[in-house]
Amino acid sequence: MAISTGIENLTPSSSKGSLFQGNYITDFDFTKQFLPDVYEKEAEIYGNRSISSFLRMVSAEMPSTSDEIRWIEQGRLHTRYDNVAIGTASGTGESIFTVTFAAKPDGTAYAAGDAPVVRAGQTIMVQGLTSGGAATGPVVKGVVTVAGAAAAGDTGTFTAVAYTAADWTGVTGAASYAKANVLVYGSEFAKGTDGMVGSLDSDYSSYTNKPIILKDNYAINGSDTAQIGWIEVTSENGASGYLWYLKSEHETRLRFEDYLEMSMVESVKKTGSAGTAAASYSGSEGFFAALEARGNVYDGLSTDLLGGGTPTMVGFDNILKQLDKNGAIEENMIYSNRALSLAIDDVLASKNSYGAGGTSYGVFNNSEDMALNLGFSGFRRGAYDFYKTDWKYLNDFATRGGFGDVEGTIIPAGTSTVYDQDLGKNIKRPFLHVRYRSSETDDRKMKTWITGSVGGAYTSSLDEMRVNFLSERCLITQGANNFFLLK
């Protein structure tokens, strides 16, 4: 059986207009002679409606004094090339290795004519690649005889001779492999020769992001602040009363705080130029956009875990292999929607060998007579620990729960060490952190002020109270190669 009727209502919702347009009961019929029983208190049917908690759990907030924030991420330590073509050379047993440079990690292209950082005397190991990019076939080792040189376009070449074969055809030619992987693993020099020619400089990737300005307000005229309703309203912070405008002001604040988090998660940089006002907006790189551009993206993890009816860990094993290729950070947090959370529970339950059918009975010494626990909050696979929690933002039908393209994210519990100029010492901060505009004269982390001539403010002759909200911030996602976006 299935749910026959959906009740994921988006109404009633906040409205734009008069205080009495749709948010008060106005059907007062004085011809009715009997007084109805009245529930004065507003029924809270959605619980805590705020979704802002994700960044509070996994990030830090730091001040910034600039319109642009730039950071550097380290490159790889060792030299390795993928998809290298191998051609013939004039020397016996020698071959020319042609390297086609891919884009740098930050997305920028290599300069035309860049030479590979392979030097004469270095030893290499080579393995063929199939047309699909899978490494297969024998691993052949050799030594570089001619250092890397620039070639036309975004390519470069170097020449090497094989140790254990007459040439390199055992890698590519004999098995018809399309390309090869090449790794520098050491060096060898003959007696009485000069030292290594040339040296290597550290490589890095440079990234930048810009803060965006967020604003909102709530306004109420002076007369309506004196209106007392017969409905007792309660806000998420526990305040209650019969003044509807106080509830509206508080919900505006809650909504704005949610916007602060949602903007940091969802923002994208502007790439189009259409429209006359295009220059006024630049956008910002949010969490999802950073993972799409520089992180790892896994499509259909929940489907892979269920394995067509037979739960399997293959999906997580693929994630572990990818983590091994990057920072190999041991502890990771999974923020998931309901479908992925249940899929993880199912596959873990299928691997549990305790009790009849692998059933866990939760607390109380795992007693069968006590509460049945079908959920898991954490597990260890290989050398990695995963801690799972539901992400309300992905489940709430009024926010991302109404979309179906993201089912979760995996966030490493890692930090980076930086020098803090304010503290005058090195500090550690999470890979994920928010930068907000602030200086000695103005703090724009979360500004609130009242204008008008009502509610204690006397800034104008306008008969209203306007509560203003403003923030200027952006999200910095460092080490995105250690993150997973689960789609």
Image (tube, rainbow, N blue to C red):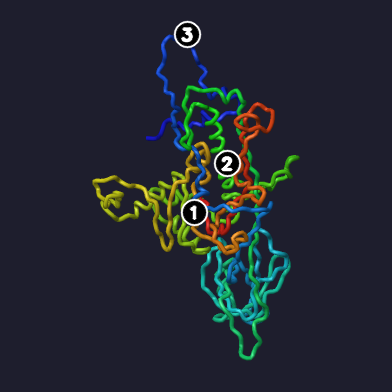
Dot 2: within a 10 Å radius of its alpha carbon, few (fewer than 14), some, or many (20 or more) residues? some
Q: Quadrant of residue 262?
A: top right
* Image x and y of residue 250, in percent: 54, 35
Residue at the spot of label 2: 259
Q: Residue drawn at (58%, 55%), measured in percent from left and top? A: 477
Query: What's the distance in space between the residues labelled 1 and 2, CA to CA?
Result: 22 Å
Judged left or right of residue 257, residue 388 is left
Sequence-first disc among 3 and 1: 3
- Nearer to the camera, 9 or 21: 21
Which residue type does callout 1 highlight? Ile
Which residue type does callout 2 highlight? Tyr
Question: Which quarter shows the N terminus?
Answer: top left
Judged left or right of residue 95, residue 377 is left
- Evaluate if marks 2 and 3 touch, with contact meaning CB atoms under 8 Å apart: no
Q: Residue drawn at (32%, 54%), measured in percent from left and top? A: 352
Residue at the spot of label 1: 410
- Nearer to the camera, 481 or 127: 481
Which residue type does callout 3 highlight? Thr
Judged left or right of residue 430, residue 4 is left
> Tag 2's secondary structure?
helix
Pair 3/1: label in front: 3
**Which residue reaches farthest left?**
369
Residue at the spot of label 3: 31
- Nearer to the camera, 424 or 360: 424
- Nearer to the camera, 298 or 230: 230
* Image x and y of residue 340, in percent: 44, 47
Number of labels in the image equals 3
* Image x and y of residue 207, in percent: 64, 58
Pair 1/2: label in front: 2
* Image x and y of residue 248, in percent: 55, 31
Query: What's the distance in space between the residues labelled 2 and 3, CA to CA?
Result: 46 Å
> Tag 3's secondary structure?
loop
